[in-house]
């Protein structure tokens, strides 16, 4: 797919400068470089310049909000080093009960930031961010989230320590190295002639349908995962499968593989444990859905690769 990388979080060719990660002394010097910028992440929420979330807010070396936190080296913007810093230990005066919800609308202001900066949900801003900000924020959120949930060795259970400028954790007890995990997920545009297969999860808002999706299992190809998931969830056999586009999805650590597949039959038999419903939607009806003129269906969420794939299927731009 020629426009694959225009998807939200599709990448901005950030210079990750991975060759610098192993140089601890050099990295220590970069962390006090006057041009260095630190992006604080509080409980999964990046710091934005203002409540409208117009851009990411970078703090200078030594700023009290990021002082003492462990930094992850994100890369270089020109010569300027960029770091992410988890500041989740900070306790605001008020904790919203939406924290950790699917879409948390709350914003937090830190008392040591006198400007308009707020911690806010990445989902709320992702479709408006520049590709560079989106890549930096997705990377920062995914890696700091991994550190937060992988403090102990999966082999021996002992506490692990951060290494390689934040891109590794080492176990001092047994010597095992641990690397940030990325979970592969297939999401598929399954078509039969002029219609597309859509499904809905049990707890989604009324009328919301999206493309079927599921985790790739160990020992499985992407193509096999597409066929297995569609068969398990909707009872539809799929023939030819092709890759379209990928999307890093840091909620918390997925990599979405957008695929297309040709259904070999029309009949749908859903697995009620996995999904609440599955239907075929014709191209004309889907155009109405995206135009907001459908009483029956709501369009897939903007920013998600499902929206991107359906939109470009309608526009005949999957080539
Ligand atoms: Zn260990």
Image (cartoon, rainbow, N blue to C red):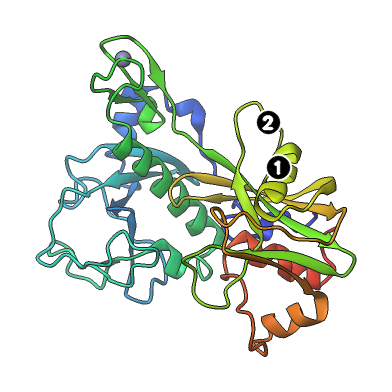
* Label 1 CB sits under 8 Å from any ligand 1 atom: no
**Quick one: which residue is furthest to the top in this view?**
174
Residue at figure coordinates x 70%, y 42% from the top left: 228
Q: Position of residue 265 (x, y in %)?
A: 86, 56
* Horizontal side of residue 247 vs 149, given as left or right: right
In this orientation, which residue lies closer to the viewer: 312 or 40?
312
- Determine the secondary structure under disc 2: loop
Quadrant of the image containing the C terminus: bottom right
Total numbered circles: 2
**Quick one: which residue is furthest to the left in this view?**
93
Residue at figure coordinates x 42%, y 72% from the top left: 54
- Looking at the image, in which quadrant does ligand 1 appear? top left
Determine contact: label 2, label 1, CB under 8 Å: yes
In this orientation, which residue lies closer to the viewer: 230 or 136?
230
* Horizontal side of residue 271 vs 172, given as left or right: right
The reply to whether residue 13 is visible in this rendering is no
Q: Position of residue 289 (x, y in %)?
A: 68, 82
* Label 2 CB sits under 8 Å from any ligand 1 atom: no
Q: Residues within 10 Å of mark 2 (few under 14, many from 20)?
A: few
The answer to whether 63 is drawn above or below residue 113 in the figure is: above
- Determine the secondary structure under disc 1: helix
Measured in 3D between alpha carbons, the distance from the residue under mark 2 to the one under mark 1, in whole angstroms, is 10 Å
In the picture of the structure, the residue carrying the numbered disc 2 is 220
Q: Position of residue 26 (x, y in %)?
A: 35, 26
Q: Please tell me in which quadrant of the rendered image residue 165 appears.
A: top left
Q: Which mark is residue 228?
A: 1
Q: Please tell me in which quadrant of the rendered image residue 281 appears.
A: bottom right
């Amino acid at each position: 797919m020629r426009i694959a990388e225009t998807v939200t979080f599709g990448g901005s060719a950030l210079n990750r400068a991975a060759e610098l990660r192993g140089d601890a002394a050099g990295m220590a010097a970069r962390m006090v470089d006057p041009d260095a910028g630190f992006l604080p992440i509080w409980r999964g929420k990046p710091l934005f310049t203002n409540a409208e979330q117009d851009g990411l807010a970078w703090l200078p070396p030594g700023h009290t909000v990021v002082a003492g936190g462990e930094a992850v080296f994100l890369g270089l913007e020109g010569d300027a080093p960029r770091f992410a810093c988890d500041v989740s230990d900070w306790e605001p005066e008020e904790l919203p009960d939406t924290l950790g919800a699917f879409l948390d609308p709350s914003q937090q202001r830190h008392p040591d930031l006198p400007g308009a900066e707020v911690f806010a949900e990445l989902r709320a801003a992702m479709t408006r961010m520049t590709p560079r900000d989106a890549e930096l924020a997705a990377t920062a959120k995914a890696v700091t989230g991994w550190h937060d949930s992988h403090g102990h060795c999966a082999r021996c259970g002992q506490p692990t320590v951060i290494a390689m400028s934040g891109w590794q954790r080492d176990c001092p007890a047994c010597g095992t190295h641990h690397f940030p995990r990325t979970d592969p997920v297939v999401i598929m545009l399954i078509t039969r002639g002029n219609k597309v297969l859509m499904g809905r999860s049990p707890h989604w808002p009324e009328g919301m349908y999206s493309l079927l999706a599921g985790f790739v299992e160990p020992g499985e190809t992407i193509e096999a995962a597409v066929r297995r998931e569609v068969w398990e969830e909707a009872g539809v056999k799929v023939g030819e499968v092709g890759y379209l586009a990928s999307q890093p999805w840091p909620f918390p650590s997925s990599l979405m593989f957008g695929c297309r597949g040709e259904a070999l039959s029309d009949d749908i038999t859903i697995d009620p444990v996995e999904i609440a419903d599955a239907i075929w939607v014709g191209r004309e009806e889907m155009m109405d859905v995206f135009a907001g003129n459908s009483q029956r269906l709501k369009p897939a969420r903007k920013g998600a690769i499902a929206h991107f794939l359906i939109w470009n299927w309608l526009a005949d731009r999957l080539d």
